[in-house]
Amino acid sequence: MTLPENTADRTFQVDLRGLVDLLSHHLYSSPRVYLRELLQNAVDALTARHTLEPAAPAGSFGIRLYADGTVVRVEDDGVGLTEADVHTFLATIGRSSKRAERIAEQRGDFIGQFGIGLLSCFLVADEIHVLSRSARTPDAPAVEWRGRGDGSYTVRSLPASARPRPGTTVTLTPRADAGEWTRPARVHALARHFGSLLRHPVTFSDGTGGGADVPVNPEAAPWERTYPTPGARSRALAAYGEEVFGFAPLDTVELDLPAVGLKGIACVLPEAVPAGRRHGHRVHVKGMLLSEQAEEILPEWAFFVRCVVDAESLRPTASRESLYEDDTLAAVRDALAERLRAWIARAAASDPELLGRFLQVHHLAVKSLAVHDDEILRMLLPWLPFETTDGHCTLDEFARTHRTVLVTSSVEEFRQVAAIASAAGLGVVNGGYTYDRQLVHRLPEIRPEVAVADLDPATLTAHLDPVDRETELAAAAYLALARDALAVFDCDVALRTFQPASAPALLVDSREARHERTRSQLAREQEGGIWGDILGALRQEAPRAQLILNQLNPLVRTAVAIDEPELARTSAEALYGQAALLSRRPLRPAESSLINRSFLDLLAHALRKDS
């Protein structure tokens, strides 16, 4: 496309106040980040100084913070700025000194971006004063830059005596409404919060007590220190985890990924957490705290730990408060997941007591992992607890006495059949909890001699003993009346003998069967319409519920001998209602009504009989 002759290139006009408002409301989570940005700039300046003077002893250059309630000052012994640097990097929003050609090859060693980071200071101050002297040029003059919130700035060159040593000092005069973030105690706390793991010495002074400087980061990260014994190291790491997260870890897992310069610890939570609830992790980049809520550092299944790590190669987002999702982060996430798997494997192999405590608290997390991880499945499936007809036990214990393992599809189904299946000698596992049914079906991979099948109502009823022919003939009239009374619920009635004798009846009815009956009913109601055609095509013979009466129960023996039709129907309804209640499934309105009606009818009959 050819531009008209009167078209000219123009530059954007930036409203600095509007930009600062954008930063404060959309880029940064809180005004407190101003101190982190100043620390990042100082650390990057020190990094550049060490590149310029590699022979300088470690710790010879540092950062000094000062806050007395009227000013906040951050001073570093870094590489400093020339007047040309000031015009280039402080007066141009978004440009970074790390992009300068002379240090481009080193920019991976830097944390932040000087230009836009300095703008964050306008969140707490209307004016920023920078005094700097470059270490690149011998006898370089000092240069002063004053930036104001309205977008104006001044630059002037000063004698070298204005700053005898190379480096940079940034001074803020806080606004009255920024006192919360610029009080001396808060500045000190923020410095410790963001910079406790920085590799350069950082000190703080508030001008009192003779102006003594207090170390902000007096010790290296706990995983970088040496300890007299492995036990002392473990205790120190656990104490650090408790200090950071506020809980005593069940155990700590050391994390070390040399390829990306990552070190840290994972603290195993001492209490269970809901499945899928992800905790934020504390992530430092080159020692600077990046985020306390970095969920993306670990996979979703690892919700039983909280991590604190320091990394060299992870890439921060623009706000430097979270991690950029890229191939490096994905590789780190996979590698850390492998470290957690290895910890579980070590516990299983060498510390059964620790593994038992871990599984007691976090069995759901391990089950979610075992579903998709064959190694964890083989290692831990025999240890995981399940609800069975033998009580709560591991599948390994359960399989020793049951070569055929039946598994229910719901908690409701298990509760219906547990007592009777146990009395009949059937081994049934509750598969209604998250992951349990999938895991039970994988038991033959660990124990090939064991067979696993879904519990079918026919399987259970086949293990109930039939009554003799004479008893069944005597009860035929009652069973017919009972079937007629319960036809509204698509329920058949049968007479069997089973243990325990205290159970008068068993209602065999699955959620899938009820759903199929509901669908068939809807199809019948919609007969002739378009929905009738659609549902009719899907219709199949709807499975019926079955009320199995226990001939061994005295109440049932009394009921089947009733010769009064209405009372027989009422007793059958009452037995159905009791069985439905014992199944612990949600009752339909018609069933609730039936229970109330049958109770009242039986009560009325009893009163009439007494009178």
Image (tube, rainbow, N blue to C red):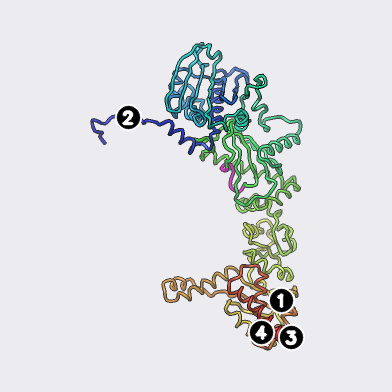
**Mark 4 or 1: the one toward you:** 4
Crowding at label 3, few (<14), some or many (≥20) Cα neighbours within 10 Å? few
Q: Which mark is residue 610?
A: 3
Discs 4, 1 touching: Cβ within 8 Å: no
Crowding at label 1, few (<14), some or many (≥20) Cα neighbours within 10 Å? many
The residue that label 4 is drawn on is 568
Q: Earlier in the sequence, mark 4 or mark 1?
A: 1
Crowding at label 2, few (<14), some or many (≥20) Cα neighbours within 10 Å? few
The residue that label 1 is drawn on is 504
The image quadrant that residue 484 belongs to is: bottom right
The residue that label 2 is drawn on is 10
The picture places residue 203, in percent across and down from the top left corner, at 63, 24
The picture places residue 507, in percent across and down from the top left corner, at 65, 73
Q: CA distance from mark 2 to mark 4?
A: 95 Å
SS class of the residue under badge 1? loop
Is 412 one of the magenta-colored residues?
Answer: no
Magenta range is 295-301
Q: Is residue 315 visible?
A: no
What amino acid does circle 2 point to?
A: Arg
